[in-house]
Image (spheres, rainbow, N blue to C red):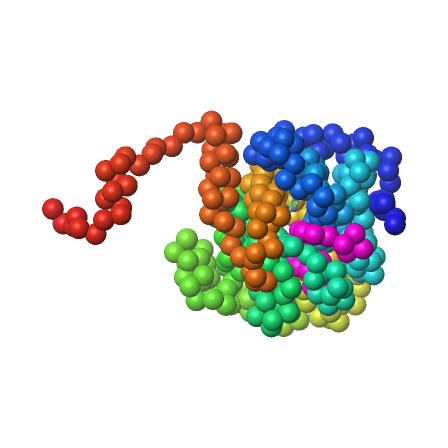
Amino acid sequence: MEDFKVKDTNLASQGRLKIEWAEAHMPVLREIRRIFEKEKPLENCVVGACLHVTKETAVLMRTLKAGGATIALCASNPLSTQDDVAAALAEEGIHVFAWRGENTDEYYENIEKVISYEPDITLDDGADLTVILHKKWERIAEKVIGGCEETTTGVIRIRALARDGILKYPVIAVNDAETKWDFDNVYGTGQSTIDGILRATNILLAGKKFVVAGYGHCGKGLAMRARGMGAHVIVTEVDPIKALKAVMDGYEVMPMKEAAKVGDIFVTVTGNKSVIRKEHMLLMKDGAILANAGHFNVEIDLKDLEEISVRKRRINPYVDEYTLKNGKRLYLLTEGRLVNLAAAEGHPSEVMDMSFSNQALSVRYLVEHGKEMKPDVYKVPLEIDRMVAELKLKCLGIEIDKLTPEQEEYLRSWEEGTI
Ligand code: ADE
């Protein structure tokens, strides 16, 4: 069996330095690693992972390996792999099949390479690994003890698999842990998306009209950070409750057809497809910038963009200029793929510390309990969520109050009311 496939093994030393940097900013995961090293909860366990191959993911891989796992890893996006990190992981004995710029065939071949290791546990980000396993490798899927899913889009897909009666093993929705989505999705996406846009374009955000499509956790974080940089933020939504939240958070809310006429920068974070279409693109101002921070590259309709364009030029590795038949130019970042991972380095290590601590502890939970769990989508156990928060606070040197016995009793009782 092929051991690994990366772009260039000579990049390993640079990758090791990057991982060291991430590790220094991920104290909770370091603590879990110390526990795993001692207790070896993952002995004889094969973990098959489809994640963004970043320095933060590398720290998670080291943690699982310290727990005794054998690991096969591929990328969850063709443009997000950090090649130096992949090289370093290969050198450390992780079976990595990932490089930046994989084409679609290579992307799926690498997923199948991971499946060929016949994983006991799957780790997914977007559910491509889980779906391919269920579609093509039923025999292997049947032996999987359990899986974890990292992102909103993936959880939605796996819930659909469960609803259709296809899901073969229990999956923990790591995304839905409070110590994941209230931090990673909000502060992680917020900061890293701005980072990606700036690394790609170096534009000034102050005074720009910045359109955020989608006001879920990620959209909320992005709108907040764009406003912090002095942009005038406009939100588009389809959900009345989320739209109302955006209004009360102080943003202008309007349909995309209106936003298209005034926006300077458009970022999709919806989890849906064709959010920006031909009818919107044709209304946009000359020079408008389009980027996506949702999981898949379907939020900006690329077919539409090609169709209405007469010329395409690569301005820099992250920016493509499209000249439309109407003479206007639109600038698409990172081919419509996750701009925060393709043009920048993804979420900062400090926030991935919490997300990946949930992953590591959920893997241990599945190894211990997965065989008794029915195929379905599960929440991260509350004790894991709380443990991650407690450890993070401890690492930050922050103490909090405790309930007094009287307060505990008060919260349990119904008798005391108005006094
Ligand atoms: N998803 C978003 N940011 C990430 C990162 N830095 N590493 C892995 N997955 C991510």
Query: What residue appears at the point 23 percent right and 38 percent down from the top-left corner?
Result: 406
Reply above or below: 91 against 3: above
Write the residue at 54% across / 63% down: 259
Image location (x, y in percent) of residue 185: 55, 49
Query: Residue 361: x and y, percent?
Result: 58, 43
The image quarter containing residue 83 is: top right
Q: Find ligand 1 in the image and state its quadrant.
A: top right
Tell whether position 131 is magenta.
Answer: yes
How far across and how far down the image is residue 235, in percent? 50, 59
**Residue, far top:** 397
Q: Nearer the viewer, residue 26 or 281?
A: 26
**Is any atom of residue 71 visible in this view?**
yes
Image x and y of residue 393, in percent: 47, 33
Q: Is residue 273 above or below residue 350?
A: below
Does residue 293 appear anywhere in the picture?
Answer: no
**Which quarter of the picture shows residue 70?**
top right
Tell me if residue 300 is in the magenta stretch. Answer: no
Residue numbers of the magenta segment:
115-133
Extreme residue toward the left, this view:
419
The one nearer the camera, 132 or 310, is: 132
Q: Residue 398, located in which quarter of the rendered image?
A: top left
